[in-house]
Image: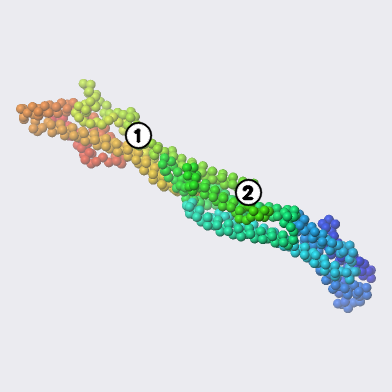
Amino acid sequence: AEAVEEAANRLSMRLLRRHDRTGLLKVNFDPALVRLLREVRFFLIYGLEVPEDALVIYRSADIYRKWTSQLDHIVELYNAVLTELLPVEEPLLEERIIKMDTALAPGLTELKWSREDRIPDFIEHAMKVVSDVSAVVDIMKGNLRKISGILNSWCKESMLERKRGAKPVSMDEYEQIHKARVGVRLMNMTDGGKEIHRFVKDSSESLKISKSAATWKAYVDFVNNIIIEGFVSTIAVSLQYLCEILDPLIIARHEMLPLFDVKIELGGNEIVFDPPFHDEDNPSRPTLRNTIDGWLKDFFAMATVMLRLDSNIGDYLNEIKEHFQMQCLLSLVSELIDNTESKCMEYRETFMKHSILWTDSVDKAFDRFLQEKPEDLVEFVEEGGMDFRAIMNRIKVDLGPPIPALSRFDQEIVRFEELKQELSLLKTPTDIHWLRIDAQPVKVTLVACARKWEEKYTGFLKSFVEDRITSLTGFIQTVKSGLGPPSAAEKPQDEKLLYATMTNIRDVKLARGAMQRLFQPLRDQVALLKKHHVAVSEEHLNHLEQAPAQWAEVDRA
C-alpha cells in the first residue's frame, strides 16, 4: 500500500525536466511508476489480488506508454537540435529555438501526469513545433554533409595520374594524356560546384531568411571556409602526388621507373638536354619546367570551377595560392626540380669536360701542335760541317718540314683513342631521379669528334711517311739509272752524260752516311701507325723494305 501511494504521488510530477548543466530535456516519468505498472501486470497475469488504487493507475498504462513514447521522440528531436547545431548555426535558428522552448514550457512548469485532459494538446503542439525546427536542422545538416561529400570526392585521386610500373615516355606524349584528363576532371568539378550552390540555396530557403541578414552572411562565410579548405585538400592531393614522383628518395624506395625520356645531345657548341629544363631564348618552347608549371596551373585551376558563395562572382584562387600548405608544397616541388636539374648538370659535365673536341678547331690545334718543338727526322752533321737537311736538300730528297717527336704523336693519338673508348663505354640510358637520360646521340657525336682528331694526327703521319718514302726511293732510282748503263766510260764523248754521272757519284758520296740514318726513322713512323691500326700502302712498305738493299747496290756501283 505504501508503494502504491508513493507511485501515485509521482503522478503529480511535471512531464519534463531540464538538466541543470547541459540544458537538455528528459521525460520525467518516474521509475517508481514504471515499476508499479510492471508489477500490476504480472499480478494480473498470475491472478493475484491487486489493490484498487494500483488498478486505477494501471488502467491508464497504455496512455502513459503512448505519452512517454511521444515525449521521448519530442525530447530526442529537441536535444538533437541543441547538441548538433554549430555556433554559427545557432543564430539562424534562435527564434525557432525560442519557439520550441515556449511550446515545451508547460511540460516543464505546469503540466503533470495527473492532468490528463491537457496533455494530448500539449504533445500535439510541441511535436509540431519541434518537428518543424528539427526538419530545418536536418535540411541544413544534410546539405552541409552533401557539400562535404562533394569536396571529399574531389580529394579521392590526384589530377596527375601515372599507372604503377609505367615505363618512361616522352614529355609530349604524357602531356597529351594529361590534358585530356584535366578537361574531364574540371568539367566534373564544375558540376559539383553548381550542386554546392544549390545546396546552400536550399538551406537558405528552408530557413526563410534574408540573404542580407548578418547571421546568414556569417553562415555563408563558414561554408566558404569549408570550401576553401576543400580546395586546399584537393589541390594538396595532386601536389603531394607530384612530389612523390619527383622525390628521389621515394623513387628509390619504391623502385619507380623514371617519368620522362630525355635525350642529351650536342647542340651548337653546347651539350643540351632535349627537352631542356628551360629555354631563355625561346620561352614558348616546351620545357621540363614549363610543363610542370603547366601542371601546377592545372591543379590551381580546380579552385576556379565554381563561383564564390559570398559574392556569386569571382573564384577562390587567391585564397588558395596564399594558403600556407600550398606555399609549402609549391616550395617542395621547386626544390625537387632544382635538385634534379643540379644532378643533370653534373652528368652533363661528363661530356662538357671534353669540350675541346667540338669547340676547338682541329686544323688550328694541329698547326699549333706542329710548332711545338719540331725536329728533323735525323740529327746528323757531316765532318765537312753540312747537316742532314742540307745534304737531303742537295740530293733533292724531300724531308718535309720538321715535326714533333714521334712520342708526341703517339701521346696525342693515344689520348684520343682513350677518349673514344671512355665515351663508348659510358652507360646509356642512365636514370637521374624522374628522368631517363638517353646519351646515345651525344656519345655518337663525341666519338666521331674524337675520331676526327685522332685521324688528323694519324692521317698527317701517314701522308708524311709515304711522301718521305716516295722521295727517298725516287732519289735511289734516279742515281741508279744515272750511273748506267750506259756509263760515261762507254761514251766518253758525251759530255752531258759525263756531267750527269759525276753529279750522281757526288750525290752518292755525299749521301752515303746520311741515307743509312734515314731508314730507321721511317720504319719507326710506319711502326707507330701500325700500332694504332693505320696501314701504310703496300707499295710504300715494299719500297721502304727494299730501299736499304737498293741503296747498298747504288753505293757499291
Picture quarter with the N terminus:
bottom right
Mark 2 or 1 closer to N-term?
Answer: 2
Horizontally, is 341 left or right of 76 in the view?
left
Depicted 300 relative to depicted 79: above or below: above
Q: Quadrant of residue 35?
A: bottom right
Residue furthest to the top: 384
Q: Which secondary structure lies at badge 1?
A: helix
Which residue is at a point 40% across and 45% down the rendered structure image?
A: 443
Residue furthest to the bottom: 47
Residue 400, label in figure = none
Depicted 129 relative to depicted 169: above or below: below
* Residue 387 position within the rendered picture, expressed as x and y whole percent measured from the top left: 24, 24
- How is colour applied across the structure in the image? rainbow
Q: Amino acid at mark 1?
A: Lys
Horizontally, is 390 left or right of 430 in the view?
left
Density class for disc 2 (Cα within 10 Å; few <14, some 14-19, many ≥20) is: few
* Residue 60 position within the rendered picture, expressed as x and y whole percent measured from the top left: 87, 73
Residue that badge 2 annotates: 318
Tell which tag, 2 or 1, sits nearer the viewer: 2
Gap between marks 2 and 1 measured at Cα: 60 Å
Q: Is residue 545 visible?
A: no
For the residue pair 494 and 428, the one nearer the viewer reads as 494
Q: Amino acid at mark 2?
A: Asn
Horizontally, is 385 left or right of 31 in the view?
left
Labelled pair 2, 1 in contact (Cβ < 8 Å): no
* Residue 553 position within the rendered picture, expressed as x and y whole percent measured from the top left: 15, 32
Counting every numbered tag in the picture gives 2
Which residue is at a point 16% across and 28% down the rendered structure image?
A: 508
Residue 364, label in figure = 1
Horizontally, is 77 left or right of 159 in the view?
right
